[in-house]
Amino acid sequence: MMSGRTCSSGHVVQAQKLVDQLRVEAGMERIKISLTAADLVRFCQDHRRSDPLLTGISASSNPFKDKKTCRLL
Amino acid sequence: MVSASQDGKLLIWDTFTGNKLVAVPLKSAWVMSVAFAPSGNLVASGGLDNMCTVYNIKAASPKTLRELDAHTGYLSCCRFLSDSEILTASGDTTCCLWDLETGKQKIIFTNHIGDCMSLALSGDMNTFISGACDSLAKLWDLREGTCKQTFSGHTSDINAISFFPSGNAVITGSDDCSCKMYDLRSDQEVIGYQDTSLNAGVTSLALSNSGRLIFAGYDDFNCHIWDSLKGEKVGVLSGHDNRVSCTGVPEDGMGVCTGSWDSFLKLWN
């Protein structure tokens, strides 16, 4: 069982760590959402053509298509 | 593709033929996560045994390379950086970077106040993101070991997390039945993906190559597809007879794979 004094100093250390972490996070340099959101949209547009799930996969170029093969024994 | 099941097996599949290439019997059947090293030489698994076990699958018969044993809670997620480093997330609320050559912990990432459920590595491997039962998502500096940003908004456990392919945003999936996109540079939530008709928790998620489509696995046995920019549901993958527990898209983006408590893995495109 911790004594009253060590108990409270433990809480203070913990609280100080929390405040320090919050300070670090609050100090971040943020870029405006209007700019970053535009970047996200642009990225999707730029990479549209290399997204087969978006543009569709033709049966002939589908590597996962069930292959009906004739096996010669 | 690698998969692990609570039937005690880790399997490596040829996804084009559906054939099983390698089977690794797991010491502990209570597996929660599995990972493939980028080289293809190693796989890792872990779960309620609190350990991350790494296997060499290129050996004549799969060999246990390392047993990473230091977490005091279950292993919820593991991801390889290379054949010599692996990152783990645990129910003990910490994430950890391990040195596979020594089997020792290199850095322990502490800041979450709930079980860590999921993690994702950035493309440049300088940062990673974690989602936890404290409903927060956090961005970490991998080398410094510090938490750089915290994203709030979810009202329940975050079970799934992924980077948007540009590396500038993060998508999360939660037990609060919604997914969210957070932008890293503006440090805020951008869109929420939810629907009043969807009353099931999100268990897993994966993005298509351009980031436009989000494939999210839910407790309602389906994988729902969201338009990441419009915030609208654009489709659903139905076919499983139980909860969808994992979702993944391969590097070439040619399909999406869902794994379920119905014991099946299904490949869709």
Image (tube, coloured by chain):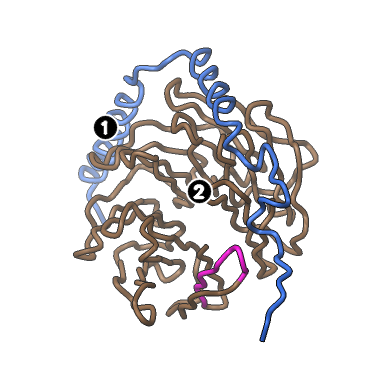
Count every numbered label the image shows and give the total.
Answer: 2
Q: Name the residue carrying label 1.
A: A16
Q: Element at badge 1?
A: helix
Residue nearer the viewer, B254 or B12:
B254
Judging depth in this view, the residue of A6 and B5 nearest the camera is B5
| Nearer to us in this view, A41 or B113 | A41
Q: Amino acid type of disc 1?
A: Gln
Q: Position of residue B157 (x, y in %)?
A: 55, 46
- Pointer 2 and pointer 1: residues touching (CB < 8 Å)? no
Going by the image, does B159 lie left or right of B105?
right
Relative to A33, does residue B90 appear above or below in the rendering?
A: below
Which residue sits at x=72%, y=63%? Answer: B242
Give the color of chain A as drawn: blue
Which residue is at a point 54% across and 17% down the rendered structure image? Answer: A38
What chain is colored brown? B
Q: Residue furthest bottom?
A: A73
Q: Taking A72 as reference, is B185 above or below it?
A: above
Q: At 63% across and 51% down in the image, what residue appears? A: B255
> Please, what is the three-letter code of the amino acid marked with disc 2?
Glu
The secondary structure that most of the magenta stretch takes on is strand
Indicate the chain on which mark 2 is placed: B
Residue B251 is labelled as 2
The part of the image, by quadrant, that contains residue A73 is bottom right
- Residue B133 vs B33, above or below: the answer is above
Task: Please provide percent x and percent y for residue B163.
Answer: 48, 38
Residues shaded magenta? B9-18
Q: Would residue B103 appear left or right of B212 to someone viewing this image?
A: left
Per the model, the C-alpha gap separating discs 2 and 1 is: 43 Å
